[in-house]
């Protein structure tokens, strides 16, 4: 059993969508714990000598070893798991309740208690599925903007009320333009090779041959095991608000691509522009950004900076020392995963004070590392993005293609400002740590300088930089003249060594 975001014609059974993603992960954990289906991919022929750890901790029935589980028992457990995945929780609970009663009447009270616990878990999961289904919104939203022979088309994919994908297309030499035929052709091309069609499609205008196109898309949706499909042109309510948002995004994309900026156009607030450019569901009033600083894997530290409503909040900045001893050498990915996990571990239970956007410095690797940390905390629905240093493109989690903003875009400038501040804060902290390390190791090499003398120097001079600048006469009262001369000579020699570049 695997988690996936794509449906392929490979003969496998697909279930979902599960929104938020934490519900899918919880369902898999329940199946592993209570139905004990195997999680491995080895060939099952019953010829293995002994089962793996999963069997001993009662997470697998052990079909790989002859005699541990009969084919009938494993098939029954599989059928029950399928009922859960198909959403037939009530039917499954009825079966388990009957079996619990049988065990209780036969005075097998321990087995009856296991069935009781399983039923309670399934009831709780069923309630969460109902809540999720009630708020489930699944749609692809199409909107366009045109000026002369040029046009831009935006497609937002929404699942469960969240924007999970955003695509844009451009035309530069349209000789003839009618919205009804333009959108019809766009839908045909967009879904021709698509493996999934959502429950509904929102359009700004009615299209030509709507009935024929709807029948074809309904058939494609049915191929993926889903029913119910409609094409809507919203006139009011939430759907119209969503369509208007995508239309604004189409216009911004057009202006960014073709640089058509009329003088009469009012400047859009930068955070609202950022929300549209990145396809965020909520307004990014609270942004937290992370960066890693290290030199060849030594003294690796991280920073987190906070931006509230476009203003950096220095009192909310945080510094992290990477603690994972398994990290060997320069491993920014592992360091990023650790620091993001530590930052949001305490916030994950109450979910208070969570940011509207998490930004990491780097590319796909850093983005994936941060996403793994959030997934471990079941916070994978938290908006997450990464900005690459050289290309200055933005990778957004759940979006296939990177976003390249116009270099004059205020939204890009804000992202760069936050990224650069996180980098500055991380490098400053790293230099301080490295300076302390170098200073301590240098003094340790001088006979006669022990922990007490090092502590005395710091207490009286206040900082390492002031100790380095101090003269022999200033050091003498705390070390004695001979030792002060040795310390001064050693620090001066150390100060002449070239620094290595920092990340």
Image: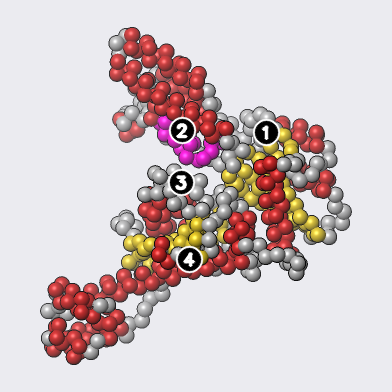
**Does residue 274 lie above or below 426 as drawn?**
above
> Relative to 54, does residue 360 appear above or below in the rendering?
below
- Which of marks 2 and 4 precedes in the sequence? 2
Secondary structure category for the residue under label 3: loop
Determine the residue positioned at 56% across, 66% down. 414
Q: Is residue 23 magenta?
A: yes
Is any part of residue 64 visible from this angle?
no
- Does the CB distance between marks 2 and 3 fall below 8 Å? no
449 part of magenta stretch: no
Q: Mark 3: give few (<14), some (14-19) or many (20+) Cα within 10 Å.
A: many
Q: Earlier in the sequence, mark 2 or mark 3?
A: 2
- Give the image location of residue 446, x and y in percent: 17, 79
| Local SS, label 2 | helix
User: Label 2, on which residue?
Assistant: 27
Residue located beneath label 3 in the image: 379
Could you tell which of marks 1 and 3 lies nearer the N-terminus?
1
Q: CA distance from mark 4 to mark 2?
A: 40 Å
| Image point (70%, 40%), residue name | 201
Of tags 1 and 3, which is closer to the observer? 3
Quarter of the view holding residue 108: top left
Residue that badge 1 annotates: 221
Residue found at the very far top of the displayed protein = 105
Q: Quadrant of the C terminus?
A: bottom left
Residue identified by numbered label 4:
312
């Amino acid at each position: 059993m695997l988690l996936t975001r794509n449906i392929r014609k490979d003969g496998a059974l697909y279930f979902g969508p599960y929104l938020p993603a934490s519900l899918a992960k919880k369902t898999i954990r329940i199946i592993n714990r209570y139905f004990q289906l195997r999680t491995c991919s080895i060939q099952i022929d019953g010829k293995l000598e002994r089962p793996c750890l999963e069997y001993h901790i009662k997470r697998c029935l052990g079909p790989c070893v002859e005699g541990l589980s009969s084919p009938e028992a494993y098939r029954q457990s599989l059928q029950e798991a399928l009922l859960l995945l198909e959403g037939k929780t009530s039917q499954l609970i009825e079966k388990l309740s009957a079996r619990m009663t049988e065990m209780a009447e036969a005075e097998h009270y321990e087995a009856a208690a296991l069935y009781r616990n399983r039923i309670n878990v399934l009831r709780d999961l069923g309630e969460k599925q109902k809540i999720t289904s009630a708020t489930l919104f699944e749609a692809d939203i199409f909107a366009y903007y045109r000026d002369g022979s040029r046009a831009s088309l935006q497609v937002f994919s929404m699942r469960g009320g969240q924007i999970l994908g955003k695509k844009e297309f451009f035309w530069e030499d349209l000789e003839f333009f009618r919205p009804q035929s333009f959108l019809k052709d766009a839908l045909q091309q967009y879904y021709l090779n698509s493996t999934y069609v959502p429950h509904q499609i929102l359009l700004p205008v009615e299209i030509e041959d709507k009935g024929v196109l709807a029948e074809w898309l309904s058939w494609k949706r049915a191929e993926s095991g889903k029913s119910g499909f409609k094409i809507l042109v919203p006139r009011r309510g939430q759907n119209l608000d969503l369509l208007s948002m995508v239309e604004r995004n189409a216009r911004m994309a057009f202006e960014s691509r073709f640089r058509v900026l009329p003088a009469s156009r009012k400047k859009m607030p930068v955070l609202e522009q950022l929300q549209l450019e990145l396809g965020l569901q909520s307004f990014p009033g609270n942004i937290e950004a992370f960066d890693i600083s290290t030199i060849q894997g030594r003294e690796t530290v991280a920073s987190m900076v906070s931006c509230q409503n476009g203003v950096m909040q220095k009192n909310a900045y945080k510094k992290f020392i990477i603690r994972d001893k398994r990290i060997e050498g320069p491993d920014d990915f592992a360091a990023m995963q650790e620091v993001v996990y530590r930052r949001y571990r305490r916030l994950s239970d109450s979910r208070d004070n969570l940011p509207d956007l998490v930004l990491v410095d780097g590319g796909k690797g850093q983005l994936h590392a941060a996403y793994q940390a959030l997934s471990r905390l079941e916070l994978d629905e938290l908006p997450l993005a990464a900005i690459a240093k050289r290309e200055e493109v933005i990778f957004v989690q759940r979006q296939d293609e990177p976003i390249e903003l116009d270099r004059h875009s205020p939204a890009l400038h804000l992202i760069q400002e936050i990224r650069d501040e996180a980098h500055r804060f991380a490098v400053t902290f790293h230099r301080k740590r490295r300076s302390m390390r170098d200073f301590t190791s240098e003094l340790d090499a001088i006979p006669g300088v022990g922990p007490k003398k090092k502590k005395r120097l710091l207490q009286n001079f206040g900082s390492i930089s002031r100790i380095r600048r101090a003269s022999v006469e200033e050091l003498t009262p705390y070390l004695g003249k001979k030792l002060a001369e040795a310390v001064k000579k050693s620090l001066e020699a150390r100060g002449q060594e070239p620094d290595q570049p920092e990340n």
